[in-house]
Structure formats: C-alpha cells, structure tokens
Amino acid sequence: MSAAAVTVQGLGKQYTLGAAAPEGHLRERLAGSVLGLARRLGGRGVPRAVAPTIWALRDVSFEVASGEVVGIIGGNGAGKSTLLKILSRITSPTEGRAEIRGRVGSLLEVGTGFHPELTGRENVFLNGAILGMGRAEIHRKFDAIVDFAEVERFIDTPVKYYSSGMYVRLAFAVAAHLEPEILIVDEVLAVGDAKFQKKCLGKIGEVAQGGRTVLFVSHNMAAVQRLCTTAALLEKGRLVFRGEPRAAVARYLSDEGRVRYIAASAKTEPYVAEAELVDAQGGPLPRPVITEPIGLRATIHLPDAAPGTRFGIGVLMADGIPLFTSSLDDVGLTLPAGPGTITVTAVVPAHTLLAGDYHVVTCLWHAREIVDLQEPAFSFSAATGDSALYRIDAERKGAVHVNCRWEIA
C-alpha cells in the first residue's frame, strides 16, 4: 500500500466570532492595533464579556494515500475550506495535527498567491518559485500554462486588471502544470466558465492518472463520482463519512434535502435569492406527485445593469447524476438588462418524472462565466399519485417516463 501523503489526527479549528483572524495580512493586524488604541483613548477600554466562539472543524482524523484522489463534500459552513487552508498551511489548527508529505500546490480562492501589482507572467514565475521550481523548469512549462489559461493577450498585464474568470484560469494553470506532488483545489472553479470547468476537470483527471495526490472541494457531484477514488463528507465541522464516492454523495444529498432555497446574504453580482417548487397556482409544493405539473420557481436579483445574464436549471437524480437541464435560452427568453428583481418558473410537464428523490440545481451565467451556481439549491421527493404506470407495474425502473409508441405486427 502506498505511503500516506496526508495524515490528519484530531484536527480542530476554533474562531472567535467578531474577531479578526490572527493569520490576517500585516495591514489588517496594524489596523486592528490602531483601532484598539483609538478605543482605549476614547474611553472604551473597559473589559468586555468573553466573545463567543465557534468550531469550524472538530476532531477530524483521516489519511490520504499517495496517488489518491479525494473529493471533499458538504454544505455551506461544513468546514471544507477551513480544512484545505490548514492543509495548505494558510492557517494553523487550534488542536490536533496535519502532516503533509510532498510539495503542495493550492488553489483555494481567486487570486491566492498572486500579487495584484505584478503581471501574469511575473506571477507565474513567483508561484513557481514558491513551489520550489527552478527558473529553467518554469520556462519550459510557461507556454503550456499560458495556453491552458487562455490569457496570452493579457500575460504582461498586471493581474489586478484581470476578471475573476481570468484569475481562476491562470491560477489553476499554474497550480496544475508546475507538478506539485499534492494538488489542493477549492470550489473556486464554480466562478469560471463552463467550458473551462470541463477543461480543469480533465486536467485534474490527468494529474490523478499521473500518480499525484489530489484533494478537491466540489459541488459538482457527478465530477466527484467520476474523478475520485474516495470522498469525505463533512457536516458542521465533523467528518461523518469517508468512503466510496457514490455512497458519500448519496448520503450528502439525502441529508441536504430541503424544498426551498434562500440565499444566505445579498451579493454584488446577479444571484438567485430564492428557489422552490410550486404548483399550477403558484403556491408552495412540498410534496409533488408525478401526475401533475411541477413548477421550479426562482427569484433572481440583478443588483446592477447586467445585459446578457442567462439562467438555467438542472435536475439531478438521487445520487447526483444529472437527469436533464433546461434554460431560458431553450425558449428564446432573456432576463431583463436590470437592475431589478425578476421571477422565472420552469414547468416540468405531468407524467415526466417517475416517483423518487431529486435535486434541483440553479445557475446564472454571463458570457462564458458562471456568476451564481447552487448545486443543489433544493431537493424534493416525487410521489406516484393516481398513476396508471404504478397500477400496471409497481416495479418501475429509471427516473423518467418516456411515452413510447408501441406496435404489434
């Protein structure tokens, strides 16, 4: 058996609510010091009650073998990003330990490790040096990195002028092509465009086939099942399942089951504020039946004018495999140029789905870049209702009903 590339024992990370993280930038620490001095001078130096704390991770233990590809899944606030930051040495644990055996390449959030004043070219060499690469080695791989990232025209432009999609493309290309022994990728790929996401997933597959270790957080359940050898499910900071990806995804999606989505907070880019199932009259539909139409309604908020923003939905089966997708493009409709709030509804015709559990994905994108992806936004169970299909045969297989034409000669 391969030696462990990552060993985690009793890992925990505690944060104080309302306090700045001690790992912040120097300017943030200075700002905190100045603020504290100002408060003392202003007579606000009276000791306050102990601030409440929260455990982002607690008692997490596991090993990752060399060459293993591990998908890390879980809902918002489960501790996924905190775990990757500890493994990447960006933050330190409150308790426990994490041992990494090998050179690590990380892509955790847009622009991580990039200096905004430096050009794309300079940042490639800077990141390569951080990873321990010699200048000659970076030179050999430079053209492949730029070609993969599709930023040739802007490679000598300071990255502070890059769009979020350009940032992601170049950062991922550097992390993947400079051949770290352990590649750690957070769900930043959800920011990029669909075509590049597919390209990145292909590259992760190549990295894995090359025998390197990969840990990545993803909301793309199909990708987790396709690429990963194992998956780890986090819930409220604790590791609750580690094993075969299909089983991990099924458990995650069943636990995430909810019939309505509400955004946690407002955003500066277009986003889905709410999404839910509705009946023919527009009322909430917590338990649909397959003999009636099922409406998938989303309330979209456009903070600023954003002409060309597009919207679509996807329906996943219980194990996260996509069943079908649909978008406003299919029927020639477009969202208003904004700003404003608009409600859109996609109606699944009666007698389309078979009884079972399903998950709904919502996606907003502009040009080639995804601006808001909820995968899944919410889940539901469809009941049979008074369906002739189930009176005829109670053992229906599959997820959809296809009204085939039959003939007997």
Image (tube, rainbow, N blue to C red):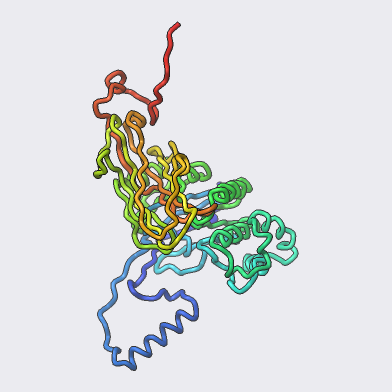
Q: Quadrant of the C terminus?
A: top left
Front-most of residues 405 and 184: 405
Asked if residue 214 is positioned above or below residue 161 in the image, the reply reads above
Count of residue discs: 0
Asked if residue 377 is positioned above or below residue 55 in the image, the reply reads above
Q: Is residue 158 left or right of residue 49?
A: right
Residue pictured at 33% horizontal, 48% vertical: 256
- Find residue 243 and report its image quarter: top left
- Find residue 372 and report its image quarter: bottom left
Q: Position of residue 284 (x, y in %)?
A: 25, 44
Front-most of residues 347 and 123: 347
Asked if residue 247 is positioned above or below residue 404 in the image, the reply reads below
Residue pictured at 33% horizontal, 91% vertical: 40
Residue pictured at 48% horizontal, 46% vertical: 224
Q: Is residue 94 left or right of residue 150?
A: left
Front-most of residues 1 and 409: 409
Q: Position of residue 369 (x, y in %)?
A: 52, 54
Residue 2 shows in the view: no
Q: Residue furthest top?
A: 409
Q: Position of residue 191 (x, y in %)?
A: 50, 56
Asked if residue 34 is positioned above or below residue 364 in the image, the reply reads below
